[in-house]
Amino acid sequence: MWLLLALLAAAPLGAQTNIPPGKGASRVPPATIAVTDEAGRSVQVPAEVRRIVSLAPNMTELVYALGLQAKLVGVTDYCDYPPEARTKPRVGGTMNPSLEQVVSFHPDLVLASKQSNRKETVENLERLGFAVYTADAHTVADVLASLRRLGGLLGAREQGETLANDLQRRLSDLERRLAGHPPQRVVFVVWPSPLISIGRHTFLADALRWAGAESVVDTPQDWPRLSIEELIRQEPEFLIFASSHADESARTFEDLREQPGWRDLKAMREGHIAVVSEAVNRPSPRLVEAIEQLAQQLHPDAFRAAPARGEEKRENRGTSGRVPASRLAKVQECRSCVR
Amino acid sequence: MRPLTPKRLFVISAALTGILLLVAVFSLKFGTRSISLVELFRILRDTAMGRSDQIDSDFRLIIFGIRLPRIVLAMIVGAALSVAGASFQALLRNPLADPYVLGVSSGAALGAILSLIVAARSPGATPFAAFVGAAAASAIVYFLGRRGGSLDSFALLLGGVVTASFLSAVIMFLMTTISGRDLRGMAFWLMGDLTTSSPIPLRWLLLVLVITIGVIYTTAADLNLLLSGEQEAMHLGVDVARVKLVVFLGASVLTGLAVSVSGAIGYVGLLVPHVMRLFFGSDYRVLIPATALGGAIAIVIADTLARTIVAPTELPVGAMTAMVGAPIFILLLRRRLS
């Protein structure tokens, strides 16, 4: 028994050992800026950020959008956009990233997202002496604000401002175009079986509003499970699916078309189905592109009219904001098969 | 029953402590970042000699910042659940009793979740609520298991299983309806998970653990008598009501403590006391310390396996213990039936 007690008394020595700041922190120039992150935690962000580990796909996209990919030393297994992000060293999944990997990449700033990461992961990293900035966007405006803020913190203020202003301009254009078009009543299908949709506090609900749509699901839970009966009762005008692969969503329609309940939906019968890029699921700069894509599918009339101000400019910059032709074809094909 | 001598107790405790330390050192070696045994020993030697500044800071952070706290947490949880199991086994005079099987862990989990919903910001609230939940659940199961003044083994086990499934349903209901909280973390925790950083410093957990085990240990001699029957124990001068209350509260504290930091890890409280009884006999004066150390060893091994066999991802440690524990539970049940 004494030995047991002795051991138990000795065991905490290791646990009590104050963890000295890691190599990541000691490399940091002494100057840091104290900021309160979007989750309400105070973070000491180094004045000059040199090594970034991203713990969420949207944060990875944001770093790329700011042109800071050279500073990105670690990403998660799910960081697939832009494609180059796949070549970065990995730290594991978003829910359970390997802290040991994060440590060995010596980041001076870790970027997390409240939507993707667990609070425990953030706390553990802070305990180990790492600065962790957690983003938490609930609206499209939050995404833009986050972009501006992180641009400033990461040393790409100008790029952040330019990008955010451009996105803001595109949203304003969209707003002008959709003025006078009543919002479509939609259901956003996060997962078809069991049917999971979105609640009113998600940034997706806000993104839908920008795209001229209104979710018929209005729950305080973020990812409510919905009964098919409720779906039929609500009679949405459009069903919205998010997918990175058009043929994958085509298969989903094929399956759902056969299922009782789903096949009786008015939107299903009339082929009122919109497919948006999976980017819509991520609070990242690409979100605006996905919103434009969705608006074009929900309100084709609005886009047949004369181009709104700023449209020309966008056309010159390539096809961003447009549904790729191949995907449109797939969607058309599906509409005909759904009848 | 072999006579208990201080020497025997000392030898058993020392041997198990040795094994525990050995297991802990090996566990320190395993993880995403590979560290060779030679490197590990050099790091440990440098630390022991106060030259920790010479250690590569990556290794220092990984070993002392990530792996060691987790191993210590595993030891605390293992010891707590195992002694809780041994206590319930004596209290209910049923060798198949285990906080998880009896639904006591689910009670603690429900308490912990309620406290997170009501008072998310106060760190002491969760373990306390988990203790209250554990105590309430074990009281319910105790009354479900009573048949005409005595405890019926099968009514008890069935009562536990049903209580556990009822409480799980309530937890599911809460998790579906409550919004705006970090429920993803909870889902991980429910499966039995040691990656969660404890909101309470490990040394406080350890203090509560040692004191509670110490208090339960004061009743060890009485528990031996209690095992032969309440009437008999009473005739031999045991204050049965007091002993039962102390052990009941102690086991609830231990379960609440373990569940509030690591979720519901099952079957440890069943297996460890059984193995220890095989080796050292059923004298509670030996069994309690042996079970505490054995439980610590078991969970450290289980957690090391959980984080290495499917690396780089991790299994919840609760899945590891259930995979080993559930079949053995069935085996023991069948042996008891025949």
Image: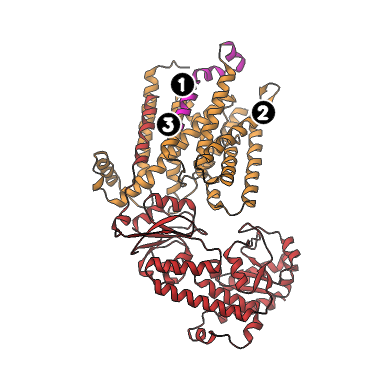
Chain colours: A red, B orange
- C-alpha distance separating marks 2 and 1: 28 Å
Q: Is residue B193 magenta?
A: no
Asked whether, in this view, residue A71 is left or right of residue A94, the answer is left
Q: Residue furthest bottom?
A: A306
Q: Which of B90 and B328 is in front in this view?
A: B90
N-term mark: 2 or 3: 2
Judged by depth in the image, the label closer to the viewer, 2 or 3, is 2
- Same chain under badges 3 and 1? The reply is yes
Residue of label 2: B143
Q: Residue at 35% of width from left, 69% of height from top?
A: A70
Q: Which mark is residue B285?
A: 1
Q: SS for tag 3?
A: helix
Q: Does the magenta stretch include residue B210?
A: yes
Q: SS for tag 1?
A: helix
**Quarter the C terminus of chain B occupies:** top right
Per the rendered image, the range of residues in magenta is B207-235
Q: Residue B293 carries which label?
A: 3
Q: Which of A334 and A293 is in front in this view?
A: A293
Asked which quadrant contains residue B104, the reply is top right
Q: Position of residue A89 (x, y in %)?
A: 38, 63
Asked which quadrant contains residue B71, the reply is top left
Q: Where is residue B134 in the image (x, y as percent from the top left)?
A: 58, 35
Q: SS for tag 2?
A: helix
Asked whether, in this view, residue B228 is left or right of residue B47, the answer is right
Residue type, mark 2 in image: Phe
Q: Which of A299 and A153 is in front in this view?
A: A153
Residue type, mark 1 in image: Arg
N-term mark: 2 or 1: 2
Q: Which of B244 and A173 is in front in this view?
A: A173
